[in-house]
Image (cartoon, rainbow, N blue to C red):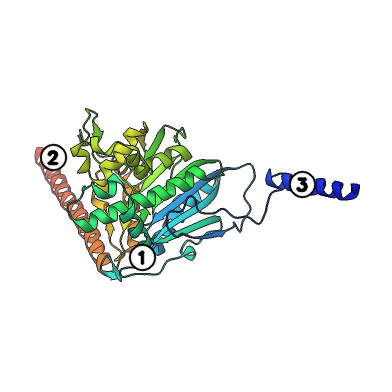
Amino acid sequence: MKFNNILCRLFIFFYLLCHTHAFPNIHTQSKPVNPKYPIETVVKEATTQASPKKKKALVAVFGVFSRSLRKTWPQINRMIVKPLEKDYDVEIYGFNNQIDNINTLDGKPIHKSSADTIKTNHKLVYQEVKQSQLDKYIKKHNSWLTHSWNGYVEKRTRINAVRQFYLEQQVADYISNAEEDYEIVVALIADLYPYVPISIQGIDARDDIIFTSWKESRQETIFSTSTAYEFWVTNGYYLGNKQSVAKIMSTVNLYDRLDKPTLAKKEKTLQYEQMVAKTIENNKLERRTTNMVFCKLRNHLSCTLIYRMTKTEAFRSMSWSQKFLAFIEQYHVLSMRHRATFTARIAAHFFLLISIIIIISRQAIKWFKYSSKTERSAD
């Protein structure tokens, strides 16, 4: 009888130890954070061992992987991941809007995407949601953003923008609930094609500071308050600590908390970038800019935003050689037609430069000959 009591007590003691995590369960993997729709998760452990002394950094890639991640990921790896490796133990998180309800994207056939699209030696947590399932949830979700926001006249553009807000919210949830103490988080949209290596120098990783890619010189008062804000708070590239990146990507939760009847009329017509600015304001974040310059690569391998990029402070501060290299960076991912156009533009600028040099040289030679004749005549 005593033996049975002792055995019973030992069993209870062992049970309590296990459930207070005294013995960790090494077979348990992280599950999706508060899944609102069916999410597929793949976890791949790192194939290389980082120094335990290194602090951790997270690179979060989100969006429609089928658009161009097959082309942008090698560049993201070279310009974002590799530079971070010098000072951080890097982990990768990918959240993919898996296209399953349309046949073409940007006028071209859709390329299949999966966890294997992200080729890395670092730990990878990959999650995906089918677009059809995401659309069903958005339709049912009683959100001011989905029912009242009309920031874009074209319906298709507005639907895509709402989808992106929900994708960003999923990334924000993952970052907020991550057990790892990431010192730096870089969140970028999957079709972003960076032209320059990321720079962490001067990055202040405080909870109330968020870094975005660029700002333009023009300003407007876009809210119902008198706060003057940059009109463009470029979306798709965020840099900061866990808290600040999660805040800027939580527009859906932010507007769910606001009192919907009292939302100003003007806020219903804000464009995507303005909504991001509003999220920054409501979360009391201080916005700063980095030197990151990029384009957004479409499925037909055409870069967008490149002309807006040339007007940014980051681009203006670059040397002529850096600017030239930035333009060269996009050459590898362009289609044959766009390569021909790009080459023609470079050739035109080159011949213009040569023509100017020849004209100046001829004028200089004429001036030199004329000066020589004048001096001889004087003698």
Q: Which residue is mark 2?
A: 375
Lateral position of residue 88 relative to residue 62, left or right: right
> What amino acid does circle 3 point to?
Ile
* Dot label at residue 283: none
Of 359 and 61, nearer the camera is: 61
Q: Secondary structure at mark 3?
A: helix
Mark 2 surroundings within 10 Å by alpha-carbon count, few (fewer than 14), some (14 through 19), many (20 or more) = few
The reply to whether the C-beta atoms of the residues labelled 3 and 2 are less than 8 Å apart is: no
> What amino acid does circle 2 point to?
Glu
Q: Which residue is mark 1?
A: 99
Figure disc tally? 3
Q: Nearer the viewer, mark 2 or mark 1?
A: 1
Query: Which x, y percent locates residue 39?
Result: 46, 59
> What amino acid does circle 1 point to?
Ile
Q: Which residue is mark 3?
A: 12
Toward the right, the furthest residue is 2
